[in-house]
Image (cartoon, rainbow, N blue to C red):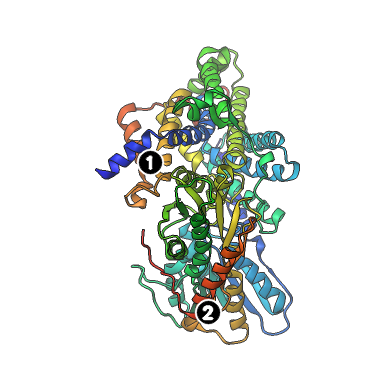
């Protein structure tokens, strides 16, 4: 009972919801990438690796240039570059998309750890200076609104970028011609091809978009929320984003809800200094919460019909 | 279709082989004059770039290779718990003379492998070897390199307690905190000493202890530290390796003080007031030296303490008043003399 009281008390703390939104958007970015890629018919489990590559690139470039914007652009490009590999292997060479994704994740872990060791001679990068970090925006007056002010108007700039992208991707997928084409290619590429849609360019574009978004998430993680690069610091977030995408039924809004629920779980766990419960049990909370809420309420998720199937022109 | 898939599997397999090869690139050695002493270092999942004890163990190995021309060193980084036994076995089966396991998390793996290779010397940092139930074992071919972390924790705890008692800290809630990685002895001993000494200086001080359940993801330690600062913590002691850099950052952002761990961390954040230091590089170096000189201690290896310089503290970026530094010196001398004994067990 005491625990329930403590958690209820936590739920009225703005700081809890501030962290929830922040970690929710961190997961949202790769989840949006996953939605676009899989809607076009290419399974992408490599968001983890793309994000890690982005995180590394962001810290490495921030160390040299001291400029957060250049670092973020390079991180986005680095994520995109990993996505190009996935795209070429799974679209051009029609390889198994799961294997390609796993290979990219392992490769990304190895290459970033290796470069980290080589460049810094096993010292690790120094923490990025505050001037080279993505800034937190304290929007005047609005951030003084009780409770909601700190949650919505005292956030990292990437949180706003992420929320904008959420709306933009939702609109693009379901309200524009491009979105219709992406979905057509993911559902029935033969029909789309017959209708004059270039299946390959749509898929290349979609997979690369997922890499760009994952790279941005990496930059947000490494030079926004924190200021360091540690080997393997993405810590499975790419996979959580993948799960969020599935729970969200391959829609941006649905994925975001799943990301927020997971973010809420991790934020509650972070308050374990005062919660009287086994920490090992507590650290399961985000996963259990996500499973119970989503598996219990959402029902069956059906992927795009051609998800994971390479397209060969003329085949049936 | 079929052929390209096969091509791909081959490429994928090659990539998989490449990754450990890349990761193991840290190995190397000097040309030797005497009989070669081959030393293998197995890191835990934190990896060599953790700015913490894995890194320090590697520094110790490098120093030994520099000083003893016949020492040949090699490193295996563990990417998951499942890698510990294969990595240790890999060195032991290849005729290595000394295999060093970095970290408490490998206590059971070391015991398993040391029994399989009774003629190979092993050393393990932060732990004795242990059985599957966590009971510590005494094995003649395993040298445990143990530290009195509670003594280093006590020195920084004195600083924290004195600052709180002085009432000059920011939040005025008479609260300090610690962010641990996982609740294991080397982490909890630091915190036990910290809490004990802070309350010795300022009996009313409230000490919050939280865990990130992680040693490499800084966002988790940042979140735990932020929650503690939200509850009024003026001083955050990070005891979570690479993860804890996030706690130092949180303290900087909030304008409260922080305390580094294992190594001098004043370069990692502005508001670091001190670091509790554990000289893992010295312990590693001495273990290698023992094997080179044929004086392997096995289970008789003495612990590293304040008294023998194995643990200590490093000053930070904020100048402390002379009565605080005098009190630190007083407590340090009392611990060295044995008149004060910091606790090693959890009391939270």
Question: Left or right: where does residue B276 sit relative to residue A283?
Answer: right
Task: Give the chain of mark 1.
Answer: A
Q: Tell me how far mark 2 sits from mark 1, CA to CA.
A: 42 Å
Indicate whether B101 appears above or below A12: below
The secondary element bearing badge 2 is classed as strand
Q: Which residue is mark 2?
A: B121
A57 or A135: nearer the viewer: A135
A18 or A122: nearer the viewer: A18
A210 or B336: nearer the viewer: B336
Instruction: Point out the residue furthest to the bottom here.
Output: B294
- At a point 45% along the width and 26% down the height, the residue shown is A146
- At a point 53% along the width and 33% down the height, the residue shown is A30
User: In the rendered image, which quarter contains the C terminus of chain B?
Assistant: bottom left
Q: Which mark is residue A287?
A: 1
Badges 2 and 1, same chain? no
Mark nearer the viewer, 2 or 1: 1
The answer to whether residue A33 is visible is: no
| Tags 2 and 1 touching, CB below 8 Å | no
Callout 2 crowding tier (Cα within 10 Å): few <14, some 14–19, many ≥20: many
Q: Position of residue A80 (x, y in %)?
A: 64, 34
């Amino acid at each position: 009972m005491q625990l329930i009281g403590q958690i209820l008390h936590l739920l009225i703390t703005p700081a809890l919801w501030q962290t929830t939104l922040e970690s929710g958007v961190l997961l949202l970015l790769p989840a949006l990438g996953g939605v676009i890629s899989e809607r076009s018919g290419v399974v992408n489990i490599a968001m983890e690796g793309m994000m890690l590559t982005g995180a590394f690139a962001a810290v490495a470039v921030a160390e040299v240039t001291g400029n957060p914007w250049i670092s973020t652009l390079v991180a986005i490009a680095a994520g995109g570059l990993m996505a190009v590999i996935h795209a070429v292997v799974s679209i051009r060479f029609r390889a198994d998309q799961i294997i390609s994704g796993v290979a990219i994740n392992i490769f990304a872990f190895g290459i970033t750890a290796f470069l980290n060791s080589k460049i810094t001679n096993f010292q690790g990068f120094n923490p990025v200076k505050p001037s080279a970090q993505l800034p937190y925006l304290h929007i005047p007056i609005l951030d003084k609104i009780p409770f909601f002010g700190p949650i919505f108007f005292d956030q990292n700039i990437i949180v706003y970028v992420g929320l904008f992208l959420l709306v933009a991707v939702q609109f693009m997928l379901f309200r524009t011609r491009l979105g219709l084409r992406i979905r057509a290619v993911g559902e029935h590429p033969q029909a789309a091809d017959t209708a004059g849609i270039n299946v390959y360019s749509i898929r290349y574009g979609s997979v690369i978009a997922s890499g760009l978004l994952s790279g941005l998430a990496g930059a947000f993680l490494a030079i926004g929320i924190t200021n360091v690069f540690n080997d393997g610091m993405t810590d499975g977030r790419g996979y959580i984003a993948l799960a969020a995408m599935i729970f969200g039924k391959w829609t941006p809004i649905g994925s975001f809800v799943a990301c927020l629920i997971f973010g809420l779980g991790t934020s509650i766990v972070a308050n374990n200094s005062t919660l009287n419960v086994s920490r090992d049990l507590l650290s399961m909370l985000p996963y259990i919460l996500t499973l119970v809420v989503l598996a219990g309420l959402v029902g069956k998720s059906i992927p795009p019909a051609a998800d994971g199937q390479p397209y060969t022109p003329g085949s049936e | 279709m079929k052929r390209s898939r096969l091509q791909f599997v081959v490429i994928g397999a090659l990539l998989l082989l490449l990754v450990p090869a890349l990761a193991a690139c840290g190995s190397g050695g000097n040309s030797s004059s005497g009989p070669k002493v081959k030393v293998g270092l197995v890191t835990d999942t934190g990896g060599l770039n953790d700015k913490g004890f894995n890194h320090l163990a590697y520094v110790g190995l490098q120093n030994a290779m520099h000083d003893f021309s016949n020492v040949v060193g090699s490193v295996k980084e563990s990417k998951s718990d499942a890698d510990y036994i294969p990595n240790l076995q890999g060195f032991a089966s290849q005729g290595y003379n000394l295999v060093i396991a970095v970290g408490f998390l490998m206590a059971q793996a070391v015991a398993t492998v040391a029994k399989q290779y009774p003629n190979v010397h092993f050393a393990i940092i932060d732990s004795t070897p242990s059985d599957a139930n966590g009971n510590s074992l005494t094995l003649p071919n395993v040298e445990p390199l143990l530290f009195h972390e509670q003594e280093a924790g006590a020195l920084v705890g004195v600083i924290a307690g004195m600052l709180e008692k002085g009432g000059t800290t920011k939040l005025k809630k008479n609260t300090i905190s610690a962010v641990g990685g996982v609740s294991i002895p080397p982490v909890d001993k630091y915190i036990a000493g910290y809490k004990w000494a802070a309350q010795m200086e300022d009996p009313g001080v409230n000490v919050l202890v939280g865990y990130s359940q992680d040693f490499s993801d800084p966002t988790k330690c940042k979140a735990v530290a932020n929650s503690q600062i939200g509850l009024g913590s003026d001083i955050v002691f990070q005891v979570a390796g690479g993860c804890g850099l996030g706690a130092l950052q949180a303290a900087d952002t909030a304008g409260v003080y922080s305390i580094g761990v294992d190594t001098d961390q004043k370069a990692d954040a502005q508001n670091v007031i001190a670091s509790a230091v554990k000289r893992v590089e010295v312990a590693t170096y001495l273990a290698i030296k023992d094997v080179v000189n044929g004086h392997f201690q096995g289970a008789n290896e003495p612990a590293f303490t304040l008294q023998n310089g194995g643990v200590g503290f490093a000053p930070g970026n904020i100048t402390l008043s002379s009565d605080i530094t005098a009190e630190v010196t007083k407590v340090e001398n009392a611990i060295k003399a044995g008149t004060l004994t910091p606790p090693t067990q959890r009391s939270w």
